[in-house]
């Protein structure tokens, strides 16, 4: 697989995900999730923001010590002290990355940084040079790139690539972009920047308008080859692009996306459940890929189709993402075929059509009265049918 074909999966659950109010994690919990992400074969794990607190420094260091197969990354502002602390925390890593950033949108430069554009470029270039002297793998992010001016992005990115950045991240920090616009931005940057071929272009999308995954995928089709995402879409405000949705879309629609992913998808659901347990953030039942209902069927038409041929209503196999199997939920919408198959699984075989029809009618009456039907209810029902 060439670099052009490989889509790098950069997981920031431990950094941006932890910035969700109430989602903070202990060092031990971060290491546990880090090991799960390594088993998932995530390419880059952003373990934290080393200078943010002594605890964050120790967590980045602990993940760097524990994880051997993935690159471990620490975020830093474009400040010398930040970069030095990040490098120190990453010393134990087999493969480490410093991820430094500065804001590039007019509103951020004027009101937050209170800096002139030329000074922002100067600080960014200096930060990348300092980082490259400490670590060969350096990523640079243009914070609020989604609201930045194209000409200015071209200027700053060309210069930070010359300074040694080998991954360039174009974040939609406030979730403002829409897919066509954002994809075009990535394509224009790659086309216009003379040294763009020396770096991998990355995207980091927030979900304020519910478009984080759509924006990320639009960018991939316009040349981005790293996607920054989180397990369960965890992240501040409305969250980040969901790792499981990005990965399974690219894998399921390999006819449409010109790249490959090295993720072991069988570990997606266990990792999702671990993150949910540690953070206390439940996964909504209808969440794509990892929700309890993602591979569940209650409609009789759907159940009958899946029982005859799975691909009639399932575009993925539940087992491929870590579920034991799909689920046939018996309820008032269920059909005769699903009812019969489910009862056979409980060891009940009907000797004639009349007894089956009687049991099925009794089941429909029960289903109208009771939302959650258990196997014990079915066995009692059959016994009285």
Image (spheres, rainbow, N blue to C red):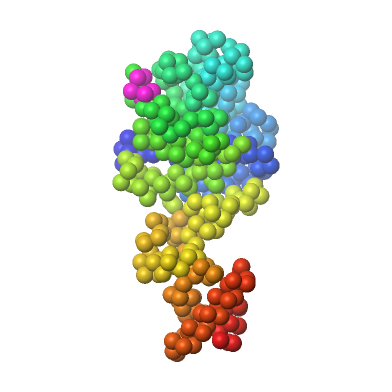
Horizontally, is 367 left or right of 3 in the view? right
Instruction: Please identify the quarter of the rendering in which residue 306 is found.
Output: bottom left
Q: Residue at x 43, y 51 (%)?
A: 264
Q: Nearer the viewer, residue 30 or 211?
A: 211
Q: Nearer the viewer, residue 32 or 196?
A: 196
Magenta-colored segment: predominant secondary structure = helix
Q: Is residue 232 above or below residue 314?
A: above
- Residue 161 drawn at (x, y percent): 41, 20
Q: Is residue 277 above or below residue 225?
A: below
* Residue 129 seen by the camera: no
- Residue 235 drawn at (x, y percent): 59, 39
Q: Quadrant of the C terminus?
A: bottom right
Task: Tell me, yes or no, whether the highlighted magenta stretch contains residue 191.
Answer: yes
- Residue 291 drawn at (x, y percent): 54, 55
Task: Tell me, yes or no, whether the highlighted magenta stretch contains residue 183.
Answer: no
Residue range of the region highlighted in magenta in the rendering: 188-193
- Residue 130 drawn at (x, y percent): 52, 19
Horizontally, is 1 left or right of 9 in the view? left
């Amino acid at each position: 697989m060439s670099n052009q074909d490989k889509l790098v999966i950069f997981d920031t659950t431990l950094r941006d995900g932890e910035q969700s109010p109430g989602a903070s994690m202990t060092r031990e919990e971060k290491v546990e999730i880090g090991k799960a992400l390594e088993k998932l074969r995530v390419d880059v794990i952003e373990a934290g923001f080393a200078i943010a607190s002594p605890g964050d420094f120790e967590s980045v260091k602990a993940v760097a010590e524990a994880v051997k197969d993935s690159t471990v990354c620490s975020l830093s502002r474009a400040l010398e002290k930040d970069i030095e602390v990040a490098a120190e925390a990453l010393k134990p890593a087999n493969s480490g990355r410093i991820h430094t950033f500065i804001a590039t949108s007019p509103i951020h430069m004027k009101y937050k940084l209170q800096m002139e554009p030329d000074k922002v470029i100067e600080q960014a270039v200096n930060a990348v040079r300092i980082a490259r002297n400490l670590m060969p793998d350096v990523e640079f992010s243009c914070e609020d790139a989604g609201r930045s001016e194209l000409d200015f992005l071209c200027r700053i990115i060309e210069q930070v690539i010359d300074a040694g950045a080998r991954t360039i991240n174009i974040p939609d920090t406030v979730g403002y972009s829409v897919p066509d616009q954002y994809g075009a931005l990535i394509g224009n940057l790659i086309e216009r920047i003379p040294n763009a071929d020396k770096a991998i272009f990355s995207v980091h999308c927030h979900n304020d308008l519910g478009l984080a995954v759509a924006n990320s995928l639009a960018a991939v089709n316009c040349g981005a080859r790293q996607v920054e995402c989180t397990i369960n879409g965890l992240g501040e405000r409305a969250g980040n692009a969901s790792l499981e949705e990005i990965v399974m879309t690219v894998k399921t629609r390999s006819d449409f996306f010109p790249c490959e992913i090295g993720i072991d998808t069988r570990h997606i659901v266990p990792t999702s459940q671990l993150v949910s347990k540690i953070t206390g953030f439940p996964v909504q039942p209808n969440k794509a890929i990892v929700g309890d209902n993602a591979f569940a069927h209650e409609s009789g038409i759907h159940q009958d189709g899946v029982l005859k041929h799975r691909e009639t209503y399932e575009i993925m196999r539940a087992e491929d993402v870590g579920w034991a199997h799909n689920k046939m939920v018996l309820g008032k919408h269920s059909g005769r075929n699903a009812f019969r198959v489910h009862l056979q699984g409980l060891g009940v075989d009907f000797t004639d059509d009349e007894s089956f029809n009687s049991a099925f009618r009794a089941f429909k009456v029960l289903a109208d009265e009771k939302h959650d039907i258990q196997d014990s209810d079915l066995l009692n029902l059959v016994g009285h049918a």
